[in-house]
Amino acid sequence: MPKPTPSQTVGPFFARELLWKDGGVVLFPGRGDRITLTGRVFDGNGAPIYDALFETWQADAVGKFPSGDDGSRPYGYGRVSTDSDGRYAVETVMPGSFTGPGGERYAPQISVAIFARGLLKGLRTRVFLAPLELIKDDPLARAIGDPDRLRTLIAARDAGDPKIYRWDVRLRGAGEAVFIEF
Amino acid sequence: MDVHPPYLYPDYKSTRLRAPSEPLVRVAPSPLEATGPVFPKHFVKDSEADLTTWGRSAPLGEKMVLVGRLLDEDGRPVRRSLIEVWQANASGKYPHPVDDHEAPLDPNFLGKGQVLTDDEGRYRIVTVKPGAYPWQNHAFGWRPAHIHFSLFGNAYAQRLITQMFFPGDPLLAIDPIFQSVPEAGRRLLIADLDLEQGVEGVALGYRWDMVVRGPRATPMGV
């Protein structure tokens, strides 16, 4: 059995290589409510991380995972970098809830991968697009348990613009986001 | 045995403020990891696998051909999967605004390419050997020559970003990024010379196989 290839950091010099024009606009074959997931990524000192690659993968509006493309790029996949303030923004559709292999129901959520200088392995997590009271039965929410930790993965709907979901990510220290393995 | 580096590896200074301090939460298999982006058939142009043909003339440096296979942990080929590469030029300089290394840019080399694996998981790229370059992690630090790889596999669980190194490079011994990998995994990041994969009188041949997580780790069939 071959051993897996070890991970290494994406480094600081990826931006021109891995960024796509319109990588922050996620495509789907069907319709859905367009939303924007946006926020900032911070390090253990609370300083913005200005050189992260931020990727998303998700179900469509009815909870189906798209398998295909629009002829130019894949459906369901977003790829942006953070800016000098550590800010990212991905415009996408509100994902539907979906079912796991054992019939378990997942609340609306987006898979997130963060790669950066100083990250020898990409960080994987998920962000919920529903409030705490609506995700309590979600398998990931149950695995986390502690509501304070769980809150680090809940995007807040903007009071002024309901199409905007705000989610800041702290990689280390106070308010550190939950990261996952599978 | 885990071949991956830890998040926190203090000799690589940037990990100190970026590595999470809490343990990762292990999650049950879900369709979020069992599925993944599917790239259009024409996403990659054949010419993008040759990094030496962007300019009006050939780039400076030692021309090389790199071949290999993308496999999963069961040894099965990962077919029609996107591989993205990027690298410094032969002088160890990236055409990137934050690269302050005082080395020349090469107008004939952008250092960026991509290729799809074939039905047997094989890939082939043509490039020049990247140069080593200094960095400010520690006094007199130099990164060994390396090519960056971004892999997708066939499911988002298989997503991997890594670096390939060259055999016999004395800088490997002082590179905290390479040394962060447990000893059992380090050899897996080093290409082999494979002269016959080169082009006689033109390009030196190397071989490097990559392995992403297998179906046991990936909840296929969801």
Image: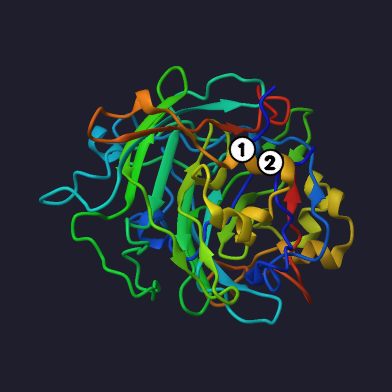
Q: Residue at x 66, y 22 (%)?
A: B221
Q: Is residue A126 visible?
A: no
Q: Chain of mark 2?
A: B
Q: Around disc 2, counting alpha carbons within 10 Å, would you say few (fewer than 14), some (14 to 19), or many (20 or more)? A: many
Query: Which color scheme is applied?
Result: rainbow
Q: Which x, y percent locates residue B115?
A: 36, 35
In the figure, A113 relative to B190: above or below? Answer: below
Q: Which x, y percent locates residue B78?
A: 52, 25
Q: CA distance from mark 2 to mark 1?
A: 5 Å
Q: Residue at x 80, y 37 (%)?
A: B1
On whether disc 2 and disc 1 are found on a single subunit, the reply is: yes
Q: Are marks 2 and 1 in contact (CB under 8 Å)?
A: yes
Q: Viewed as shown, does residue B192 lie left or right of B25?
A: left
**Residue at the spot of label 1:** B188
- Which quadrant of the rendered structure holds the N terminus of chain A? top right
Q: Viewed as shown, does residue A55 lie left or right of B97?
A: right
Of the residues shown, which amino acid type is indicated by label 1? Answer: Leu
- Which quadrant of the rendered structure holds the C terminus of chain A? top right
Q: Chain of mark 1?
A: B
**Residue at the spot of label 2:** B185
